[in-house]
């Protein structure tokens, strides 16, 4: 069986310089830092079913440019504590707890995917906590769902609620599927087809925990499932986007992927506030900070400067 210590490296990736824990209303959140502790802070917020380690390529580039880079595992992800229930608002409150533990002054934030959408919501309700925001492929789309008759909508809602209740009724017995590190990397590759096998294997070494004789399991609460971070709908955020007062840089991928949002530049441009700029990276998927860490770092650093 492959040992994690044998694979714990990837060109350009660097593990955090420091780690700590923050209490977020009773949930213990794992926090990580790269760079000089006396440098100005910038917050990195990961996406759903990810963890702070997915910034191991981008964070060192920002730290080497003079920033104190701070990230954390969201509740139920990575080394952070599992919770009885999960919600979008709870993740936003956790973010505030982490930011407050670093500074009470406004800070720049960089979010990816779900993390970027969380920061959009925080910017709407507490713009004084941010100086600038970088949104990495987490901008909402204006695509409308196919029209469904009212009686079908009711049936769909009932089926969705039943499915959610059935899932949570079994959470005490659920476990992530075990396997070798190579197995975990291969399963992740189905969701991240553009990322190299070497990166995915590295990701497994830092994002999985031993499962005894069964090998390894991803460090994600089995109670979590896709679509389980609500209540949230992208169009809610899109309709509020024109009123955003925090200067924002949006960076979009252009190749759709299973975990991506699929937002096109043309869809979001009509909703952009005056202090927002959005660029699309050609031939780049949803995990653009992993595919193109140097280019993304240059965009972020120029914007934050």
Image: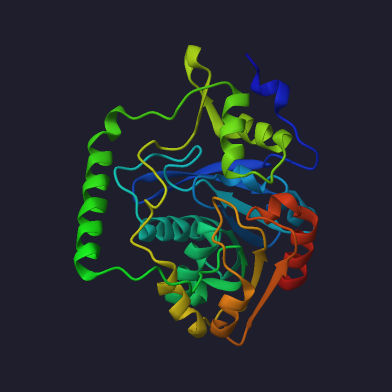
Question: Is residue 104 positioned above or below 128 on the image?
Answer: above
Q: Is residue 164 visible?
A: yes
Q: Give x and y (percent) for residue 245.
A: 54, 82
Q: Give x and y (percent) for residue 227.
A: 39, 52
300 with respect to 102 (left or right)? right
Q: Residue at point 22% right, 70% down? A: 150
Q: Give x and y (percent) for residue 251.
A: 67, 67
92 with respect to 281 (left or right)? left
* Residue sticking out furthest to the bottom: 274
Q: Is residue 36 visible?
A: no
The image quadrant of residue 94 is bottom left
Question: Is residue 64 positioned above or below 53 on the image?
Answer: below
Of 104 and 302, the residue lying toward us = 302
Question: Is residue 39 positioned above or below 17 on the image?
Answer: below
Q: Residue at point 38% right, 58% down? A: 88
Quarter of the image that includes the N terminus = top right
Q: Give x and y (percent) for residue 128.
A: 51, 76
Question: Is residue 305 positioned above or below 223 on the image?
Answer: below
Q: Residue at point 64% right, 61% down? A: 42
Quarter of the image that includes the C terminus = bottom right
Q: How many marks?
A: 0
Of 133 and 199, the residue lying toward us = 199
Of 257 and 250, the residue lying toward us = 257
Q: How is the image coloured?
A: rainbow
The image quadrant of residue 262 is bottom right
């Amino acid at each position: 069986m492959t040992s994690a210590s044998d694979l714990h490296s990837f060109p350009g990736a660097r593990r955090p310089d420091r780690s700590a824990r923050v209490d977020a209303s009773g949930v213990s959140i794992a926090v990580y830092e790269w760079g000089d502790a006396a440098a100005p802070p910038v917050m990195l917020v990961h996406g759903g079913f990810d963890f702070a380690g997915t910034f191991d390529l981008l964070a060192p580039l920002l730290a080497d440019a003079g920033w104190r880079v701070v990230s954390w595992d969201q509740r139920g992800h990575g080394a952070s504590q599992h919770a009885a229930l999960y919600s979008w608002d709870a993740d936003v409150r956790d973010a505030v707890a982490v930011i407050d533990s670093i500074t009470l002054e406004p800070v720049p934030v960089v979010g990816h995917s779900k993390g970027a959408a969380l920061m959009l919501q925080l910017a709407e309700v507490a713009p004084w906590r941010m100086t600038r925001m970088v949104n990495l492929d987490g901008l909402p789309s204006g695509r409308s769902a196919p029209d469904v008759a009212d009686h079908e909508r009711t049936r769909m809602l009932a089926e969705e609620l039943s499915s959610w209740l059935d899932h949570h009724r079994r959470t005490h017995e659920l476990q992530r599927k075990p396997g070798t590190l190579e197995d975990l990397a291969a399963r992740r590759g189905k969701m991240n087809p553009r990322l190299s096998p070497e990166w995915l294997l590295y990701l497994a070494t830092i994002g999985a925990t031993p499962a005894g004789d069964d090998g390894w399991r991803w460090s994600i609460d089995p109670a979590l499932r896709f679509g389980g971070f609500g209540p949230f709908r992208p169009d809610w955020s899109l309709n509020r986007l024109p009123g955003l007062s925090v200067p924002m840089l949006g960076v979009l991928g252009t190749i759709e992927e299973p975990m991506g949002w699929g937002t096109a530049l043309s869809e979001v441009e009509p909703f952009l506030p005056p202090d927002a700029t959005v660029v699309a990276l050609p031939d780049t998927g949803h995990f653009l900070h992993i595919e193109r860490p140097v280019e993304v770092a240059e965009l972020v650093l120029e914007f934050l400067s």
